[in-house]
Image (cartoon, coloured by chain):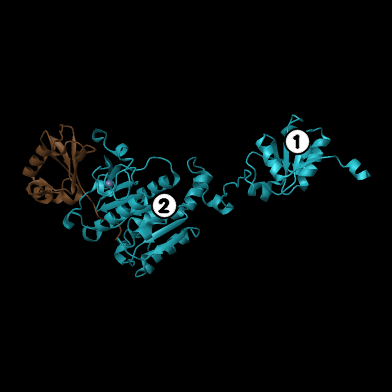
Amino acid sequence: MTDQTATQPQIREVSVGDALRLAEAGYRIIDVREELEWNDGHIPSATLLPLGDVLDRIEAVVPDKTTPLLVHCAAGARSARAVARMQSLGYTNAVSLKGSMLDWRRLGGDWEAPQPLLTPAQQRRYSRQLLIPEIGQKGQRKLLDGKVLLIGAGGLGSPSALYLAASGIGTIGLVDDDAVDESNLQRQVLHTVDRIGMPKTESARITLNALNPETRIVEHRERLTADNVERLIANYDVIVDGTDNFDTRYVLNDAALKLRKPVVHGSIYRWDGQITTFVPFAGPCYRCMYPTQPPEELAPSCAVAGVLGVLPGIVGLLQANEVFKLLLGVGETLAGRLLMFDAMATRFDEVKVWRDPQCPACGEASPFVAASVQVAETLEPAAR
Amino acid sequence: MSSVRIPPVLRDAVGGSRSVAASGATVAEVLRDLFQQFPALRDRVTEDGELSRFVNVYVNDRDVRYREGLETPVAEADTVILLPAMAGGSS
Ligand SMILES: [Zn+2]
């Protein structure tokens, strides 16, 4: 017996394997690392009590000195000292984990890496949104992780892209093969006089990244067709449809059903707009709503019929509003409702849109689903 | 008389009105009265005497396809909405 062993209090040390069994058996876990280490990851049921605080705070944290305690740090040195200090205060049942947290995790020990917090810059930039209970840090994280594809960087795409980028949507894809034309500037507020002739996706990227350099803008300089639609939409969470023709809308509808992507629909004509949201197999699709497309003279494009400049602004922002709810998973979308805006009368109306069991795209014979399990709930009650 | 909402693309066939009055106890009767008043409208939305498939008809907020079709009853206070698809968006 040396002097050293006489003065060094005897402490009990356990291996990682034994520690896992003790944790299972109900030992209370005390993490004596520093707060910064804790923030990088920790055992979910553990209590943080840095070594320097043990003498001062252990009695408040663990009033019963016979409580079985499993004390750990990163590798076993600090926890041994912590257990010695606890014993000096009369704790009789504390053991030190002699082993690394890497081994703990490798052997299947519980571990929790906290949600990646927003950076200080993000906290400042999005502070007004963080104050909203339905958004907060977690919701903002969802928006920052969100990927939204806009079909068209023109009338409807302009206002939605501006507000989606401003509020921190992480990735915005733009599908458009047009160049900026002088006649676009009356309503397509993404573009500017000095960019006439520039590809719209490029002009949009310049505007959106000036507004929010953090948003990733993906340019798809092509027209959406049956051949490229699945590739274009595959990596996005929500599709915003602002196309100018029926063929594209039907092509998009079918691919979105196949790949289970929600589509926020908007269309405009002079003083009138329509908005709805299609959630695959949970609500109606575009073909349920409009099984047959009208002849051209009954559905002229804006280029032929004209459009009030402010109208795509209003309709496009109502589409963006749907995107937020879809990404955040809050509120009530326009699924199953067609919202109609009449700018001349300043009036909103809505009609119900039901899922059609005979729909060739999403009905009982849908090629995109093995068994159309949910059809019944989305039908008009009388038709069930 | 019930009121019939006319979509923008069809307004020139009814003299520019957003809404016109028509009488009838069913959708079919209301449409018959409407087409008598506005023959130009009939040419635009019927094929071989039948309502074209690209025009959705609602009584208030309900699509008549999921009720009794053209036999869906229409009350005096009801609003009938004619609604063909709109194309416009991007360009
Ligand atoms: Zn459908």
Horizontal side, residue A261 vs residue B62: left or right = right
Q: Secondary structure at mark 2?
A: loop
Q: Residues within 10 Å of mark 1 (few under 14, many from 20)?
A: some
Tell me the residue that label 1 is attached to: A58
Measuring from the top left, give residue A383's x and y in whole percent. 24, 35
SS category of the residue bearing label 1 = helix
Say if labels 2 and 1 share a chain.
yes
The residue under the point 91% across, 45% down is A4
Q: Specify the amino acid type for callout 2.
A: Asp
Report the residue at 24% width, 56% height from top.
Answer: A246
Give residue A51's position: percent from left, percent from top.
Answer: 76, 43
Chain that appears brown: B
Q: Residue, x 21% and y 57% (percent of image)?
A: A300
A206 and A241: which is toward the camera: A241
Say which chain is cyan: A
Q: Is residue A184 above or below residue A286?
A: below
Q: Is residue A107 left or right of residue A62?
A: left
Disc sitting over residue A237 in the figure: 2
- Crowd band around label 2 with a 10 angstrom C-alpha radius: few (<14), some (14–19), many (20+): some
Residue sitting nearer the eye, A213 or A260: A260
Question: What residue type is disc 1 on?
Answer: Ile
Q: Position of residue A280 (x, y in %)?
A: 34, 47
